[in-house]
Amino acid sequence: MAIPKISIITIVFNDVKHIEGTILSVLEQTNDNIEYIIIDGSSSDGTLDVIKKYADKLSYWISEKDDGIYDAMNKGLRAATGDFIWFLNSGDQIHEKTAVDKFIQKIDEETDVIYGETVLIDEDGNILGMRRKKAPENLTWKSFFTGMMVCHQSVLVRRSVAPEYNEKYRFSADFEWVLVSLKKARKVVNSHQILSRYLEEGATTQNHKASLKERFEIMKRYFGFIPTVLIHVWLAFTSFFFSLQNKGDYRPFDSSKD
């Protein structure tokens, strides 16, 4: 089997503080069979200067106004030509320089999705801990009945399987995108490694509530109304007890996954 090409797509808007760290985490990969795409939403804070600094190392980039993050992500999808799609938005980073070389060995011709663990980082790139939800050993679309079981930034989907994002949602289209990709996948592979570092920014209360409402609507459509209500009650209790037993919304950093 030919070595698959990985299309990494970064969405950014006015994030001069973090964009360079994201770019370098991609360009420093030991595997060079990577197509790197940046979709900028017409930034005005210096972000474009950083992108232009690395323009000769990018496969494609564009800066123009968009109709929201999922419109921008769909632009990236349409521009991609690789075998697998990996979204790594501004502020997020690939966990280690050998990440692609490691997981690419686990992909075969039937693999449509490969996933892994996520660490959370702060504004300065310091590791806070592992994402609260541990990636299941065997991930299926039904795993999402109990929430976003894997971080969007730690899931790669074969381009021929990946749907476009549903732009009717403002905050939770990525939840449905991963769910639908898993539902269509012939084979899902657990990489058993940390794939990404996710910038924990903390959404506003208003956005968080809107996101939960959208996610409820998505889950209701795929799992039914009554089961979705019951699982949300259970999730509320488990989240409360987790917060009592742990400092912050994360697990201790698991260096064994490195």
Image (cartoon, rainbow, N blue to C red):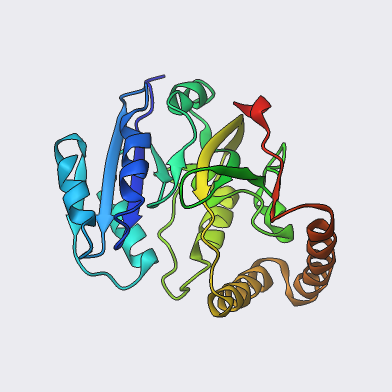
Which percent across, then down, holds residue 173? 50, 65
Which percent across, then down, holds residue 232? 77, 70
Q: Quadrant of the C terminus?
A: top right
Asked if one can make out residue 160 in the rendered structure from this viewpoint, the answer is no
Question: Would residue 81 appear left or right of 184 to someone viewing this image?
Answer: left
Q: Quadrant of the N terminus?
A: top left
| Image mark count | 0
> Nearest the camera: 95 or 180?
95
> Nearest the camera: 230 or 37?
37
Image vertical order of residue 128 relative to residue 148, above or below? above
Identity of the residue drawn at 58% across and 73% down: 208
Identity of the residue drawn at 51% across and 58% down: 177
Question: Would residue 248 appear left or right of 118 to someone viewing this image?
Answer: right
Question: Would residue 101 appear left or right of 225 to someone viewing this image?
Answer: left
Which percent across, then down, holds residue 125? 47, 44
Identity of the residue drawn at 53% across and 76% down: 207
> Nearest the camera: 157 or 199?
199
Question: Would residue 48 appear left or right of 22 to someone viewing this image?
Answer: left
Image vertical order of residue 227 relative to residue 251, above or below? below
Which percent across, then down, holds residue 154? 53, 43
Identity of the residue drawn at 40% across and 43% down: 85
Asked if one can make out residue 195 in the rendered structure from this viewpoint, the answer is yes
